[in-house]
Amino acid sequence: TSCFASMSAQMLASSVAASAVAPRFGKKASGVSARKAISSVPVRAARVQAAPKPAFAVTASSEKTAIVTGASSGLGLYTTKSLIDRGDYHVVMAVRNVAKAEKAAKELGFPTGSYSVMELELGDLKSVRNFVKKFRGTTKRAKTFQALICNAAVYFPNAVEPTYTVDGFEESVGVTHLGHFLLANLLLQDLVKADDMGIDKRLCVVGSVTANTNTLAGQVPPRANLGDMSGLLAGLDGDRNENAMIDGDRFIGPKAYKDAKLCNIMTIKEMSDRWHEETGVTFSSMYPGCIADTPLFRNHTPTFRFLFPLIQKYITKGYVTMSEAGGRLASVVCDPQYTTSGAYWAWKGGGDQLWDNYWDNSNRESAFDNKPSKEGGDIMKAKKMFDISAEVVGLKPSEMGPKGGNGVKMSLPKMPAFGRN
C-alpha cells in the first residue's frame, strides 16, 4: 500500500513529476489500460530464499485456506510466504498474471501443495465472478476457506488523464475498490458456509496511511475526500474534467488512489456493522507500514523510486521490508489478538505516526486499533458509499449479506447505466 511519507518526500516527488513530461493516458486512444501500457517498467526481482520447515505437523483436516489478491509480487507475495511458513495454511494466489505468480512462488521456495494460483483480473467484473465460481468448484479449498485478504492495488501518481477498466470505471478506483468490493461481498457467503476450524473467519482489506487525513502523510495534498460521491453515482466513466473521480471533480491520479483506499477502510467498517454480529466473521483493514520499495511505485519517476526508500529509512524511519509487512498482514488474519471487528490495525514502529517511528521504533510486534479520519469514521457516509458501490458493480439482492437479500439498503436516486459501451 502507499506509504507514510514525510512532507519533504512528497513535495520532492511532486516537483520531479512536474518537471518531467507527464504520461498521457487517453480514454480510448491506446486501447489499453495504464497498467498494460507501463508493464515494461522493470521491478526488482524477489530474492531466492530457502523454504523453511513447518513449525509443526499439519494434517489434511487442519490445513486452512486463505485467498490473497495481488500475490505475485510485493506485499501480497510476502504475505503469502508468511502464511505458508506458518505451516497450517494453503494460499490461493489470486493474480492477473498466473505465470508470474508461479515463477515467484518457485523463487521463494514455496513447497508443492502449499499454494495454488488462480487468475483474477480485478479490473473486469466478469473475471471477478468467474474467479468466485471457479473457487467454489474447488471443494476442498471452499470447505476450508478461513481468510480473504484483499491486497491488490494500482497507483498512477503522475497521471493527468484517467484510464479505464474493462467495465469502463476509472482504473484506480475500479481495481482497488470496486473489484475488491464485489469479490468480498460474493465470497462472504462462502466464508460463512466453510467449516469452523478453531479460529474466527476473517476478511481483511489493506488500507493506506495516505487515505487517513488525521496523519501527517494523509495531510499531504491531494487529500482523500469522497465529497458528495456524485462521480461514483454517475459510474466513474467521466473524463479528466468531471465524473472520473468519486467526488465528481477534476481527475487527479494520486487522489484517485487515496479515495479508493478510503473506500476500502469504510467498506470494512460497514461490512462489520452489518454482518459481524450475525456471522462471527472478523472484518478489518490495516496499514502494514511504509514498504518504500514496493512494486506499487513502479509508475513513479526514477528519482522518486531512488530517493523515497532512503528518506523512509534514514529520515522518517517509517520503512518496513516486504517481509516484515507481509508478516504483519498475515498476523492480522491468523493471530488471536486481532479479533476486533471493524478495526483499522497499525503499528507504532515502522507505522503511520512520525513521532512513534522516532521514539517507539522498537515496538514493531503488536498492532493497535488506529483511529480513522473524520470522513473514514462517518457511519452514514459509509452506508451511502456501500450502497452506491453495490449498485455500480451489479450486486444482486441474493448476493448481499451472508444469507442473501439482507443488504439493509438505503433509498438512492435512480441510478444511471454504468460502464463505457
Image (cartoon, rainbow, N blue to C red):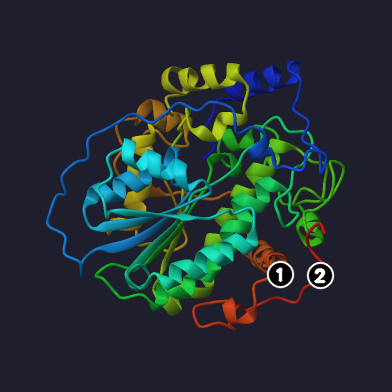
Label located before the other in sequence (1 or 2): 1
Q: Are marks 1 and 2 in contact (CB under 8 Å)?
A: yes
10 Å crowding of disc 1: few (<14), some (14-19), many (20+): some
Q: Is mark 1 on a helix, strand or loop?
A: helix
The residue identified by callout 2 is 415
Per the model, the C-alpha gap separating discs 1 and 2 is: 8 Å
Whether residue 133 can be seen here: yes
Location of mark 1 (residue): 391
Tell me the quarter of the picture where residue 361 sits. top left
Q: How many marks?
A: 2
- Of residues 63 and 240, the one nearer the viewer is 63
Query: Who's the residue at 54% across and 50% down the image?
Result: 372
* Residue 220 percent location from the top left of the image: 64, 32
Left or right of 148, for residue 11:
right
| Residue that appears at 48% across and 28% down | 292
Amino acid at the residue labelled 2: Met
**Quadrant for the C terminus in the image:** bottom right
- Residue 269 in percent (x, y) is at 53, 62
Note whether 14 is above or below 151 in the view shown: above
Residue 211, compared with residue 269, is above or below; it is above
Residue 393 location, quadrant: bottom right
Left or right: 366 with respect to 217? left
Q: What element carries label 2?
A: loop
